[in-house]
Image (cartoon, coloured by chain):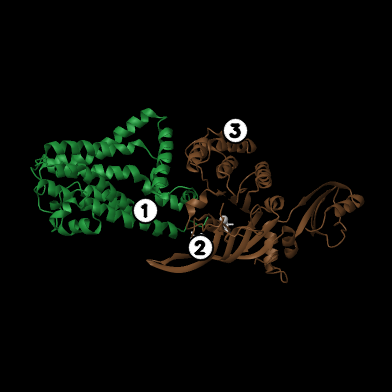
Chain colours: A brown, B green
Amino acid sequence: MDTNGRVGAVDPFIELDGVEKVFEVRRKTGFMRRERHRVRAVDSISFAVARGEMVGYIGPNGAGKSTTIKMLTGILTPSAGRLRVAGIEPSRERTRLAHRIGVVFGQRTTLWWDLPLIDSYRLMHRMYRIPDARYRENLDRLVELLELGSLLDVPVRQLSLGQRMRGDIVAALLHDPEVLYLDEPTIGLDVVSKAKVREFLRQLNAERATTVLLTTHDLQDIEQLCSRVMVIDHGRLVYDGALAGLHESGESERTLVVDLARELPPIDAPPPARVVRVEGPRQWLAFPASESAAGLVARIAAEYPLVDLSVREPDIEAVIAKMLHGDSHGKEVGRPVP
Amino acid sequence: MLVEGVRAYGLIAGMWLRAGMTYRASFAATLVGNLVMTGLDFVAILLMFSQVDSLGGWSLPEVALLYGLSVTSFGIADLVLGSMDVLGARMRDGSFDTLLVRPAPVLAQVGADRFAPRRLGRIVQGAVVLGWALVSVDVDWSVPKVLLVPVMVVSGAAIFSAVFVAGAAFQIFAQDAAEVQNAFTYGGTTLLQYPPSVFGKDLVRGATFLVPLAFVNWVPVCHLLGRPYPVGLPPWVSFASPLVAVACCVPAGLAWRAALRAYRSTGS
Ligand SMILES: Nc1ncnc2c1ncn2[C@@H]1O[C@H](COP(=O)(O)OP(=O)(O)OP(=O)(O)O)[C@@H](O)[C@H]1O
Ligand SMILES: [Mg+2]
């Protein structure tokens, strides 16, 4: 494939080195008066992603996630820094790169809004010059996996959000891209649809070794899919490493919700677990996310009249917030980028 | 790049054609409707000539020649790049982003978007008037003069296309400026339907040198009819339209490329 790229043991498929994006914004400050100021959406970010990795890219609203993805796809030109995907500089050789990447924007569709789903796919078939046999095979496989068979003749604008999202994922993968970028692919989806999409992505990564970079506000996406997470805040990369490490550096907690047979005083839980809320027979216990819930559950079940229970994962924003504002673990980078 | 663009254009336009053909009846109706709508401009000229014998010293067939050339050239540019005016909306709702991740020139994708045969209406109407004007006008036809007619149409279409593309580039730089672009394109074709002598000197100069629309028809038609040029120009310029077209298309293309690099997307 690309012989002048740095192919070797490391094989960084995506490489960013000090990448920045500054937006100049003009704001109306009065009649005919405008004030200019600069928004540093991405501030000197460096990381590398190897072929076949599945990476979660998370951070609060306005952190710079979408901006990064837009630079990786060539939509936006970086203001500074060096950026390579498959050895290609995206903004300079956008069309050449397009054959090798797939993109799904959760917030908008890449399909032709007024035309039946199948028309978009037929057009992509030709536009990407996908060999006929390959196209048919991919289409059949993807349509089956994502359960779109009955929807192919429906105009895109009539699809529900979850159906459209699956339609977009098919469109992004028809040409066998080496990397798939997903910007909030599970936004607005119900539990069943989310599970379908996740299962599909896991399979894609496992079977085809497609490199996946996804942004999300749903921690479960990351937990179920990504061995590596990168956290961005105010345009800066503040964490790059395993999800477990993120929990530690954020000292995040899971919540055990127990329903007892009757109203009782707060459960006497072994520290560091503790009751944080009591409401009638229902009690909420916080315990470290890095610990198993089994011991705690066994102990409560043995000593209390337990009726029902559920475990709630820490919400991603809470984890990040704790990490960002936690004193000692503030700006720790799990795996420093060379 | 050009080959890729033409190919992508064909693919997308073909898809829209197939989609549109499913409503044959409405296709015919919109085509006729479009023909009538764009033809109203010529009706206005006919009405004027029912009151006067000449317009700025030009007879009806002569004005019809200007009209036919302007409308046909513009019609071709509008057929190819007509959907440029939805660019502003596409940038505001962020759907322009999706064009940039596909392996086809963006210009072709934008131009072919919602391709509809109804855009042929203007060309048909312009060509009919042009045909009538060519047989009615009093010209000493020679081989170069006959050849000049298709050259004018093609160059004119290229000049209008360049204006479309430059306008589109400007829309990207300025975020939203569809009105500015429409003033030059739709305004330009209306301007060129009338003889230069009915306009003020400054406007004619602007249309000659600034946005060289005058080379679509005014200048070469003056040569055909043996009239003096609208502004003082050397005699050889009557055949300069193709050169002017190239001189317009190159900077327009460069501006378009620069605009894509400067494109800033939306915040959401
Ligand atoms: N086209 C633009 N013009 C001006 N400012 C922009 C533009 N795009 C993004 N920004 C600004 O850059 C910053 C980062 O935006 P970005 O869309 O990358 O955030 P994000 O991490 O994707 O957030 P979210 O989780 O809300 O999607 C924000 O402050 C935003 O206002
Ligand atoms: Mg975003």
Which mark's residue is nearer the viewer, 2 or 1? 2
User: For the residue marked with disc 3, what is the amino acid?
Assistant: Gly
Q: Secondary structure at mark 3?
A: helix
Evaluate whether residue B63 shows in this view.
no
- Distance between mark 3 and mark 2 Cα atoms: 40 Å
Which mark's residue is nearer the viewer, 3 or 2? 2
Give the side of residue A92 with respect to residue A260, left or right. left
In terms of depth relative to the viewer, which is nearer, A336 or A84? A84
**Residue at 40% across, 59% down:** B258
Chain of residue at mark 3: A
Q: Secondary structure at mark 1?
A: helix
- Is the C-beta separation of discs 3 and 2 under 8 Å? no
Image location of residue B99, percent across then percent down:
47, 49
**Residue at 17% across, 47% down:** B194
Give the side of residue A149 with respect to residue B257, left or right. right
Crowding near the residue tagged with mark 2, few <14, some 14–19, many ≥20 C-alpha atoms within 10 Å: many
Chain of residue at mark 2: A
User: For the residue marked with disc 1, what is the amino acid?
Assistant: Ala
Determine which residue is flagged by label 1: B168
- Distance between mark 3 and mark 1 Cα atoms: 39 Å
